[in-house]
Amino acid sequence: MKNILITGPAGIGKTTLIRRLSEIFKEFNPAGFYTSEITEDGNIAGYSVTNLFGDSKLLAHTSLKSKSVSGKYHIDIKGFEALLEAIFSRDKKTGLYFIDEIGKIECQSKKFCKLIGDLLNADKPLIASISEKGTGLIQEIKKREDVKLYEITSHNPEQRLKELTMEIRDLLLD
């Protein structure tokens, strides 16, 4: 199984795990992105998305003007898709992909949903965090036979990092 999904409750450390793994495997020229919370006055006001080279864009925010909405967040679909295009159009030498996260906000983008399908079907490993809860595409991805699901809890992040490092190394050396 070349597709590895990391799941767990919000705030448990999925993004941190993805970022650490992308650093560990940077010699394989990974392509992908991670999301970060934007907090204002102690509350989550939105999310930004950053590629593995450090280029960042606003993904969603409570004060954004947009017709695309997930909960209280308005989503910059065009900006998100432009970042995806920039990341995945130059991946010729990429050895693996990191996606944080396959979640409700990201799945508002049809291009993102198609990209995830393409990456899951590609011959290179995909390491992604995926929303613990979710319907539609999120549920379908978890049911695929070519994915291995790792749950992260407050008790096992370091153990999961070691397990995933070994598993990914094995995938890349196959």
Image (spheres, grey):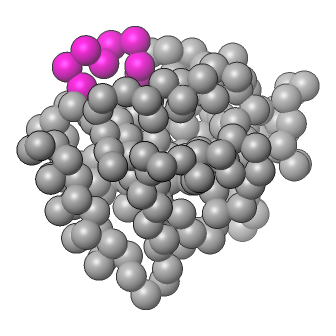
Q: Position of residue 162 (x, y in %)?
A: 22, 70
In the rendered structure, the answer to whether residue 123 lies left or right of residue 71 reads left
In the rendered structure, the answer to whether residue 147 lies left or right of residue 58 reads left
Q: Which quadrant would residue 49 be assigned to in this image?
A: top right
The count of marks equals 0
Q: Residue lying furthest bottom in this view? A: 155
Q: Is residue 105 magenta?
A: no
In the rendered structure, the answer to whether residue 11 lies left or right of residue 165 reads right
Q: Nearer the viewer, residue 71 or 116?
A: 116
**Vertical relation: 170 (above or below) 156:** above
> Which residue is found at the position 37% from the left and 27% from the top?
122
> Which residue is found at the position 30% from the left and 77% from the top?
158
Q: Main secondary structure of the magenta part?
A: loop
Tell me the magenta residue range: 87-94
Q: Nearer the viewer, residue 93 or 23?
A: 93
> Which residue is found at the position 42% from the left and 57% from the top?
148
> Which residue is found at the position 46% from the left and 61% from the top?
149
Q: Is residue 93 magenta?
A: yes
